[in-house]
Amino acid sequence: MADLLGSILNSMEKPPTVGDKESRRKAREQAARLKKMEEDERRKKAEFRKKMEKEVSEFIQDSSQQKRKYNPMGKIERSILHDVAEVAGLTSFSFGEDEESRYVMLFKKEQAALEETASSQTKKAETCPNSNYRDKYSHLIGTSAAKDAAHTLEANSAYGCVPVANKRDTRSIEEAMNEIRAKKRQKQEDDSGAHSSSS
């Protein structure tokens, strides 16, 4: 039996080794390409950072400029620019609706405080309209105000009008429990009396 198994195994073809070498070579090439791409990206980020540091230092030196607007850029570039501005002691904000149109604006510290107060004042002015909210939302709340309806409301005497004196229970817990037990006994006696008379 062992000889039969040995002869079968010996007669089988061995797997090709060329494919293994080729797949390893392709994997090595792909790893090398990936590493090169990462290095290129790292180099581009470093170059961009140096360029932004130079521009920011020029902006700081220029006393005629209080703010600077940059062209729309990607998320990574914006984060690098925010980091450079923070290190330089500047205030930076990103503006824009979607990723393609977002841009960075740099402010010198004195100008940033003035800009923030001005923008907050304009927002306050925009949010304090002179119109009455009832006029604005009359389609939702109707034209008759709730105050007018509230004056005509009267409490129904059948519901919930209990004098305060009746609300206070001066009994002790034991007395209340004894009364409840007595009522239960009375009810059971009445029920058993009704059952015996009906039979």
Image (cartoon, rainbow, N blue to C red):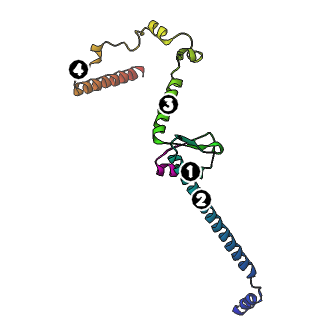
Task: Check whether the beta carbons of the residues at disc 4 and disc 1 lie within 8 A of each other.
Answer: no
Tell me which label, 4 or 3, sits earlier in the chain.
3
Left or right, 158 with reference to 145: left
- Vertical comparison of 37 with 19: above or below: above
C-alpha gap between disc 4 and disc 3: 65 Å
Front in this rendered view, residue 170 or 52: 52
Front in this rendered view, residue 33 or 105: 105
C-alpha gap between disc 2 and disc 3: 36 Å
Badge 1 element: helix
Quarter of the image where the C terminus is located: top left
**Amino acid carrying mark 1 in the image:** Glu
Q: Which residue is mark 1?
A: 55
Write down the quadrant of residue 192 in the picture. Answer: top left
Find the magenta span and give its range.
83-93
Q: Which residue is mark 4?
A: 170
C-alpha gap between disc 4 and disc 1: 84 Å
